[in-house]
Image: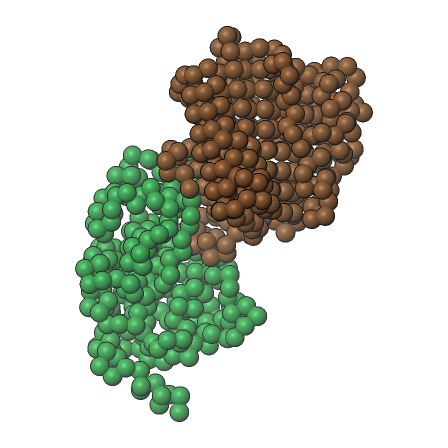
Amino acid sequence: MSLIVKNLQARVKDGPVILRGVDLEVPKGEVHAIMGPNGSGKSTLSKVLCGHPDYEVTGGSAQLDGQNLLDMSPDERSRAGLFLAFQYPVEVSGVSNANFLRAALKARMPEGEEPDAVAFYKRLRATMQRLGMDPKMTARAVNEGFSGGEKKRNDVLQMLILEPTCAILDETDSGLDVDALRIVSEGVNSLRAPFRSFLVITHYKRLLDYIAPDVVHIFHRGRIVRTAGPEMADYIEQHGFDFLKEDDA
Amino acid sequence: MMNDDATPPEVPNRLNEDWRYGRPQQFAAELAARINGRGTGELTTDAPAECVRRSLPEGADACPPSIGSDYFLRRALQSGGDVLHIVLPRGEWGTAEVPLRIRCHTGSFYAPQLCVELLPGSRAHILEEHTHDRNSALVCLRSYTVHPDAELRLELRETGDDASRTMNISRIQCRENARARQLTTCSGLAWAREETTGELCGAEAELLLLSANRPEGGQWLDQRCRQLHHAAGARSRALYKNVLRDAATCIFGGNIRVEPGAHESDAYLSNLNLMLSAEAAVHSLPQLEIMADRVRCSHGSASAPIDPEQLFYLRSRGIGEADAQAILADAFLHEVYLLFNQPRSTQP
């Protein structure tokens, strides 16, 4: 098993409860999709799993490869193999993309060691080329002045460089045009491997046409209420989430 | 930590003229009391010998107008140190740094005076390094005159230990179509006061005043900056950025003054502080005094902790909290170095 979440409950610090008992297992080698109406808590789940300080876990557990995520700081979770592609990637003025990624790689190395500069830049440029990114972006500040699509590509670039064992993609398709969606999806698919798992959060089936999921979960009112095969995405595309009203009733 | 006998400077008060215009009585009085004959220090330069004199020019007064007129400070300077007068004639001095070095010896007070003139059409990059040995005090009067069509790039680096104090009282005068930019950095000192008066005396003159600092421990950093627009059509910018840790304190008093007749002036003043500790404190008071028409002047000040979303973003990529904070602090100051180093035509 890669990612195992049991009865996870969380709230905004000093605020409302968002996650009301999430149960989820994403085995290695699989891609799971989470779909659900706006405000159901999908993005909160991704942030809570990555240790966002705005949220307080009030119950349950989350493990990655047997390690208790909830006992770890956000950076420890990342170094343990977890990655989050943000719904809204943050702009970091004054830090170049290249330096940012080098710092992230260095953080994974033993104390005192650094990534080889020549090999790093060679790999970085090659990966950017695969994602159709301008090589000049290595020197630009992280996400500063980037379009929405460029930010999403940049997050995927980071994922390809850091090679996590479990990647959460939070609405990575939003802001991408058709061509960018295909390129980014190809990048994600290139990382698919028997030792890696993906959790893909999306509103639309179009992303799942490129990144074929093994399982689709429906998220509603802070927990997973349905789990099915890829055909569930087709059903949602055609019928929407009206069937969840029956659950509410 | 600061010396027990070092009295902290006053915190800003809008009604306190001394604070606003930087009459540094406290520090100067203390220094004057410590003077016994000449101070001990060194004032050296690698500038070509034909450009260097060891006395001020006839009638010159390195002490900037309106600042430092306090009696005690004058007395300290009269009793104090050495004089260096450098005249750089027309030429490309900008291709290499012209170093100026001031060293203040252990346990001593030193009060040198610098007077530098860039003659019309000259270009110079001057690196001024002030070094403090243990427990020393420095008062330095600095006067830079940038004559018409000359260009000055001036970097002041002040370093010392946590028992030393320093005061730089500076004037940068830009004549017609002259350009000057100054970057000041100060590290390690218990107490540092840095005053700069930029005077724009000719049309099309341009001045850029920059400062980047990382006070920590119990350090006090006291910064005063004036942009005096005497002539019409001149342009000035000031950007002072500080990253504060521990119980460090920063005081900033900035003033843009546009004199009558200095129409079409363009000036901006900004003081930004990144607070890495709840114990750190900032007192900032930027001001405008405008007595001319058709001017474009504005100022701003902001002090805030690190953006938690930025911090989380870096940490979500595996970068530890301390390293992430250091990266974001470097990024915060990056703009200052960028402005100092970028070509003139691309300056804001």
- Residue drawn at x 73%, y 14% as measured from the top left: B38
- Quarter of the figure with the C terminus of chain A: bottom left
What residue occupies the far bottom of the structure in this picture? A249
Q: Height in image: B104 above or below A20?
A: above
Q: Height in image: A211 above or below B340?
A: below
Chain B: what color? Answer: brown
Which chain corresponds to the colour green?
A
- Residue drawn at x 36%, y 80% as measured from the top left: A225
Q: Height in image: B127 above or below B67?
A: above
Residue B214 visible in the displayed image: no
- Residue drawn at x 65%, y 38% as measured from the top left: B222
**Colour mapping used in the image:** by chain
B40 left or right, relative to A47? right
- Quarter of the figure with the N terminus of chain A: bottom left
Q: Position of residue A30 (x, y in %)?
A: 27, 65
Q: Nearer the viewer, residue B27 or A158?
A: B27
Q: Where is residue B240 in the image (x, y as percent from the top left)?
A: 54, 41
B162 left or right, relative to B260? right
- Residue drawn at x 54%, y 49% as measured from the top left: B300
Residue B20 visible in the displayed image: yes
Q: Where is residue B265 in the image (x, y as percent from the top left)?
A: 49, 41
Q: Nearer the viewer, residue B202 or B142?
A: B202
Q: Which of B307 and A12 is in front in this view?
A: B307
